[in-house]
Image: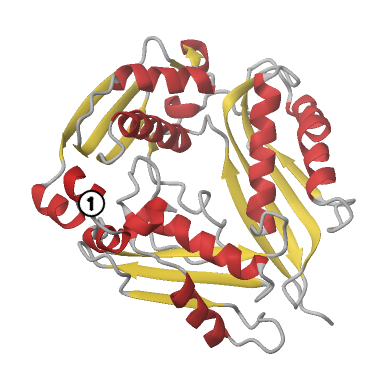
Amino acid sequence: MEERKLISAESVTEGHPDKLCDQIADAILDDMLRQDSHAHVAVEVCASVGQFVVFGEVRGEVYSDIPGIVRQVVRNVGYTSSTIGLDADSCGVMVSLTEQSAEINQGVARLDASCESASSREERYAAQGAGDQGVMFGYASDETDTLMPLPIYLAHRLAQKLAKVRKDGTVAHLRPDGKTQVTIEYDSKGTPKRLDTVLISTQHDPEVSRDWLQDQLVEHVVKPVLDEVLAQKVAHDSYRMLVNPTGSFVLGGPAADSGLTGRKIIVDTYGGAAHHGGGAFSGKDPSKVDRSAAYAARWVAKNIVAAGLAHKAEVQVAYAIGIADPVSVNVETFGTEADGITRADIARAVREVFDLRPAAIIDE
């Protein structure tokens, strides 16, 4: 009998407290980079009942209205009343930002403007070291058109649809906080064959029943997404559907669960299908290789799979603070290489073709 395995992945909606903090950190980062594209920014956000704390390090010619940015993000997500646990207009915002350490900056600073304009590209790329040490991973698989693993891709699509039907009023009585989870059955060759379970936990008004909510979510969220994403490729005519397994989910967001940037790193990447170096993305400018190098490694992995060199690819890249060139670059293709191509061939091509120095990544 063929051995099959179940693989699961989760996603969260924009109103989840951790993801709310991620969005605030990125909105602050975006505002600062608009003012100074070379600013060094590392912003963290935490959230509790009616309160946000913004902290971190910044170096650059920038001034941002932090409380205003926090409130705008919270408002856009849909937290506009204390009745649902958080009001953008009355929540507290505390800010504690300091200047980036000069010792860190000296290893990662770009050439100044006068030097940069006259310098060659190679000199520029060599001048900017990595913002920290660390190991980053990128992954790609041909099991979806986006080259993402199917479980995390499907979980994301469900979370996005859940937010959409809440905001456009297709499904009434929904509130911003929510999570999705998908379980897919794979065959022994690693091919997705069958949808096993869909789980949706969503915040809602107190007057609705779980049965009504499940009917609405199946009709307006689950079925449209499954029919589009899975189509005829993966069986989904018989699966387990779970909605709010604890019964009700009225109190949500930071009022029910504290939030913090960087706690959804698996949701932000591959849902557990690939390794993770531990670094988060949100609130970090491109000099922070936690973010930029993880994006670049994904770019490399996508190119490997899109070129037909392998069905799956995981790229690992490691850096030392202040040094431009990666300490190491490794490629794993899990035995899925195309006929006549070896993993060593692919790894050698990656090192020859892709420039993974931080300044080169930023330029690309």
Residue at 55% x, 80% y: name it.
346
Q: Secondary structure at mark 1?
A: helix
Residue 207 placement (x, y as % from top left): 68, 15
Residue 174 placement (x, y as % from top left): 65, 22
Residue lying furthest left: 102
Q: Is residue 273 above or below residue 25?
A: below
Q: Quadrant of the N terminus?
A: bottom right
Q: Is residue 153 left or right of residue 76?
A: right
Residue 341 placement (x, y as % from top left): 64, 86
Q: Amino acid at mark 1?
A: Ala
Residue 50 placement (x, y as % from top left): 37, 19
Q: Is residue 80 left or right of residue 38?
A: right
Q: Is residue 255 left or right of residue 29?
A: right
Residue at 25% x, 55% y: name it.
131
> Depth check: 46 or 130 in front?
130
Residue 92 seen in render = no
> Depth check: 68 or 151 in front?
68
Residue 11: which quarter of the image?
top right
Q: Residues within 10 Å of mark 1 (few under 14, many from 20)?
A: few
Q: Is residue 168 above or below residue 125?
A: above
Residue at mark 1: 118
Q: Is residue 363 left or right of residue 270?
A: left
* Figure coloring: secondary structure
Residue lying furthest front: 118
Residue at 25% x, 47% y: name it.
117
Residue 216 seen in render = yes
> Depth check: 221 or 32 in front?
32
Residue at 70% x, 49% y: name it.
154
